[in-house]
């Protein structure tokens, strides 16, 4: 998912005119050694913080269908993460860097969500909205000055960009659909001369149903005589 967000940001910045101007978009760490090797105008988009957005954690998953419309797998719920980037412009003069950074800022602040045409891989497959917030900082992300100090580089103007993207859940293969009905097969008796055994349902203590069946073996009591109106019971 992370590399797919990188690709979407690169495509977004290239469409803003950077590619036409010959300006490269890279995702390297802007260390002092990297800055010394740079020789052309460059926009550096450095990812330095990844944190889960617990407010978007869900409990319902999804289903994956094949070409015939049958369920072939079930996917657990997606997890959402904040990806925080440090965007800087590198050129021969500070004025050129500021002009380049201004162009990048204008593109990012005008984009609240990454367009679907820029998404690839799992992001395109999930079809969920990938949000983008430019100009701010992460909720608990390190400050830009701390990042520069950790990189060992010289502090310079930078733009904080956050992207909220989903990480697809784990897919579990589903059992194939049932295409045949229930089949009942009878097994021949092993001993043809063996007396036939009767199946007893509710009658207990009866060894043989006899010719009249189970009902004929039960003792029937005569029905009580009907009393006429006015008769007293002794």
Image (cartoon, grey):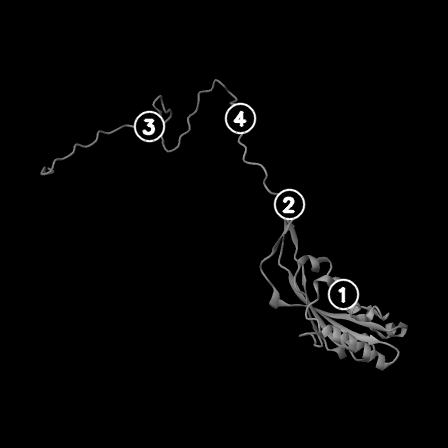
Q: Which label is found at residue 150?
A: none
Q: Any mark on residue 68, and which?
A: 2
**Res 80 → quadrant:** bottom right
Name the secondary structure under disc 2: loop
Percent x, y of residue 36 = 89, 74
Disc 3 packing (10 Å; few <14; some 14–19; many ≥20): few
User: Which mark is nearer the camera, 1 or 2?
Assistant: 2
- Dot 3 and dot 2 residues touching (CB under 8 Å): no
* Marking on residue 215: 3
Residue 187's disc number = 4
Residue drawn at the location 60% of the way across and 43% of the way down = 177
Tell whether label 2 touches label 1 (CB within 8 Å): no
**Distance between the alpha carbons at the discs numbered 3 and 1:** 82 Å
Distance in Å between CA atoms under marks 4 and 2: 38 Å
* Residue at the spot 47% in from the left edge and 20% down from the top edge: 194
- Find the distance from the CA under tag 1 to the CA under tag 2: 34 Å
């Amino acid at each position: 998912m992370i590399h797919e967000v990188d690709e979407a940001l690169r495509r977004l910045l290239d469409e803003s005119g950077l590619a036409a101007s010959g300006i490269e978009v890279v995702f390297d760490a802007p260390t002092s050694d990297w800055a010394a090797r740079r020789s052309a105008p460059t926009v550096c988009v450095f990812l330095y913080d990844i944190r889960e957005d617990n407010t978007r954690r869900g409990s319902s998953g999804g289903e994956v269908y094949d070409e015939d419309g049958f369920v072939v797998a079930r996917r657990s719920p997606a997890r959402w993460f904040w990806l925080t980037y440090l965007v800087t412009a590198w050129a021969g003069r500070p004025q050129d860097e500021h002009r380049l950074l201004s162009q990048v800022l204008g593109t990012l602040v005008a984009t609240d969500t990454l367009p679907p045409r820029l998404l690839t891989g799992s992001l395109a497959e999930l079809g969920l909205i990938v949000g983008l917030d430019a100009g701010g900082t992460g909720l608990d992300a390190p400050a830009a000055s701390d990042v520069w100090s950790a990189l060992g580089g010289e502090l310079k103007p930078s733009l904080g960009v956050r992207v909220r993207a989903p990480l697809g859940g784990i897919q579990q293969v589903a059992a194939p659909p049932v295409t045949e009905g229930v089949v009942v097969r009878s097994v021949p008796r092993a001993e043809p001369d063996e007396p036939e055994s009767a199946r007893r349902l509710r009658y207990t203590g009866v060894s043989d149903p006899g010719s009249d069946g189970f009902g004929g073996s039960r003792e029937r009591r005569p029905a009580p005589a009907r009393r006429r109106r006015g008769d007293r019971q002794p």
